[in-house]
Image (spheres, helix red, strand yellow):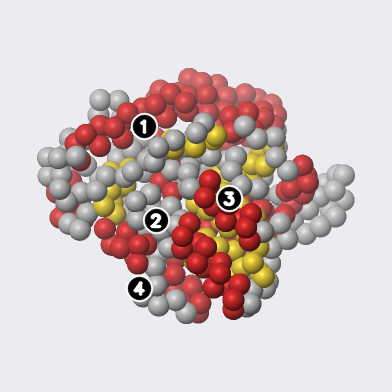
Amino acid sequence: MEFIDLKAQYKHLKQKIDARIQTVLDHGQFIMGPEVQELEEKLAEYTGVKHAISCANGTDALQLVLMAMGIGPGDAVFCPTFTFFASAEAISFVGATPVFVDADEVTFNICPLDLERKINEENSSGKYSLKAIMTVDLFGLPANYPKIQKIADRYNLKIIEDAAQGFGGAINGKKAGSFGDIATTSFFPAKPLGCYGDGGAIFTDNDDYAELIRSLRIHGKGTDKYDNVRIGMNSRLDTIQAAILLEKLAAFPEELIVRNLAAENYHKQLSKKNDIIAPLVPEGFYSSWAQYTVRSENRDTYMAQYKETGVPTVIYYSKCMHEQSAYQSLGYKSGAFPNAETLSKTVFSLPMHGYLKNKTPIINC
């Protein structure tokens, strides 16, 4: 069994993907070809935002957003400690400081209560200029934007939605990628919507942000490529990857249905287990199930048993951001983020993808 079965997906979409790639090979516009603009238009339509701007990868997307917001040295951005390194890394890369926030032990996402505590602590210290909250739609579930938006408004902070894992998720019908001031996603192959290499995108309704980011992603260019009006970066989505994503996006809604059916099957099986806690999707929320992640104090035992039965498992994430060697200088102590630290010691993920029809592994452990 595959943890994420990209081979099954390609087999299902092979003719359409191959035809798309052949079209790119025929016209030869490998950088910023017509498929890139077509993809951006369809991404904007899917998420319900005015602008979708593609780029080279999800980490670049975050960095481009931070640059567009003018965030840099002396500034602080709040972000979850229980997430992938790229979220905090992008903040550090522009010279700002990540201020870590504990996780909600039920949804795994950034905890609104701890977020407000951390904002008040940083306001009291006066060490940084507080600029933004970077949320993460972890494992496919959007963060609690109704609560987070109220906090952001109260303290005059921007919201950056990291929807790398959440693309396809929603809250009361509003799609991931449309929350806050600006959002990003990743098209890394293992994401809910992934290409066959690296890729990313930025979503916003703000015309000024969109114009600036379109310049920043191509060396800060102005009216033409030799008129560089600002310092930018080289972060363009390859045309072939855009072509692949066009066909994958067309199939994406059907894949989401399968992912959610697979999650329901897991829920039914896990309800019989007293020592496994299944993930919770709050009322009104919809998950794209980037991963199906459970909790158990007996994690190692279960993972070993699954391995024996041919079912792969993965741990996301065994070490929180505040525990990373790169952030030891920030001075966080063990126990500072009790929920996140508990999750890192107890979570593990089971196979999840859009081709699990009637193939959800039976849990006999």
Q: Quadrant of the N terminus?
A: top left
User: Label 2 crowding class (10 Å Cα cut-off): few <14, some 14-19, many 20+?
Assistant: many
Label 2 sits on what residue type? Asp
Q: Which residue has dot 2 on it?
A: 104
Q: Which mark is residue 259?
A: 1
Residue 60 left/right relative to 356: right
Seen at 62% across and 24% down, the residue is 23
Disc 3 designates what residue?
A: 149
Label whose residue precedes the other's in the sequence (1 or 2)? 2
- In the displayed structure, 67 sits above or below 121; it is above
Q: Of the residues tagged 2 and 3, which is closer to the observer?
A: 3
The Cα atoms of the two marked residues, 4 and 2, are separated by 15 Å
Of callouts 1 and 4, the N-terminal one: 1
Q: Position of residue 48 (x, y in %)?
A: 62, 32
Single out the mark in the foreground, 4 or 3: 3
> Dividing the image into 4 quarters, which one contains the C terminus?
top left
Task: Please tell me which of labels 3 and 1 falls first in the chain.
Answer: 3
> Tag on residue 6?
none
Element at badge 2? loop
